[in-house]
Image (cartoon, rainbow, N blue to C red):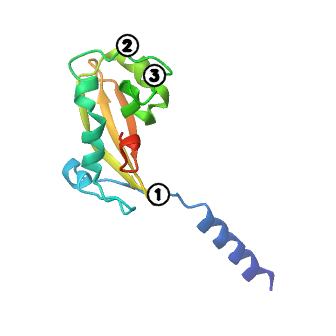
Amino acid sequence: MRHPLYLLLILLTLIGCGPAAVTLRGTPSELSAIRSTGERTFSAGDVVTWAQLDDHFRDRTAKLEVGQADGKALLGRLVILENGAEAADFLKAHGCAQISGPIGVRKLPSALQVDIELTGRGGQKFILILKSDGTPAGEG
């Protein structure tokens, strides 16, 4: 009689341990078309555009300092970079030769997480995770 109870317990454990959001894969154009299902609809492509990655990373050195995310400076639009510490270290060491993406998208209940890949001059890779709820404060 205990076996069905154990099976039920294992099944409930596996269901409860599932990922909160599955990362969707595909071509950049397919991923860019994925839309938020929250109050305000917007696409993964919109999130990438709002982040202005080309302006901030390509063909120039972004001057990033920890604590600059004040809503007005560069990091105000790149909030998910954890105050830019990792991105700043990557840019100082490797520069930015290429921006690829989206390379993955996760649909959250009222937001999108969009994965972007930066490639340094020597071929080193860095993944940015942009999260947006579609509001101006949440851009990028």
Along the line of sight, the residue nearer the viewer: 27 or 108:
108
Label 2 and label 1: CA atoms lie apart by: 32 Å
**Considering only vertical position in the picture, is 43 above or below 79?**
below
Label 2 and label 3: CA atoms lie apart by: 16 Å
Residue at x-position 44% and y-position 25%: 84
- Which part of the image, by quadrant, shows the C terminus? top left
Question: Which numbered circle lies on residue 68?
Answer: 3
Q: Position of residue 40 (x, y in %)?
A: 34, 59
Along the line of sight, the residue nearer the viewer: 107 or 2:
107
114 lies left or right of 20: left
Residue at x-position 38% and y-position 13%: 93
- Which part of the image, by quadrant, shows the N terminus? bottom right
At label 1, the amino acid type is Ala
Label 1 and label 3: CA atoms lie apart by: 29 Å
- Quarter-wise, where is residue 11 in the image? bottom right
Crowd class of label 1 (few under 14; some 14 to 19; many from 20; radius 10 Å): few
Specify whether residue 101 is in view.
no
Task: Name which of mark 2 and mark 3 comes first in the sequence.
Answer: 3
- Quarter-wise, where is residue 5 in the image? bottom right
Give the residue at mark 2. Answer: 92
Comparing marks 2 and 3, which lies closer to the viewer?
Answer: 3
Task: Name which of mark 1 and mark 3 comes first in the sequence.
Answer: 1
At label 3, the amino acid type is Gln
Quick check: marks 2 and 3 in contact, CB under 8 Å? no
Give the residue at mark 1. Answer: 21
Along the line of sight, the residue nearer the viewer: 112 or 103:
112
Mark 2 element type: helix
Mark 3 element type: loop
Specify whether residue 29 is in view.
yes
Comparing marks 1 and 3, which lies closer to the viewer?
Answer: 3
At label 2, the amino acid type is Lys
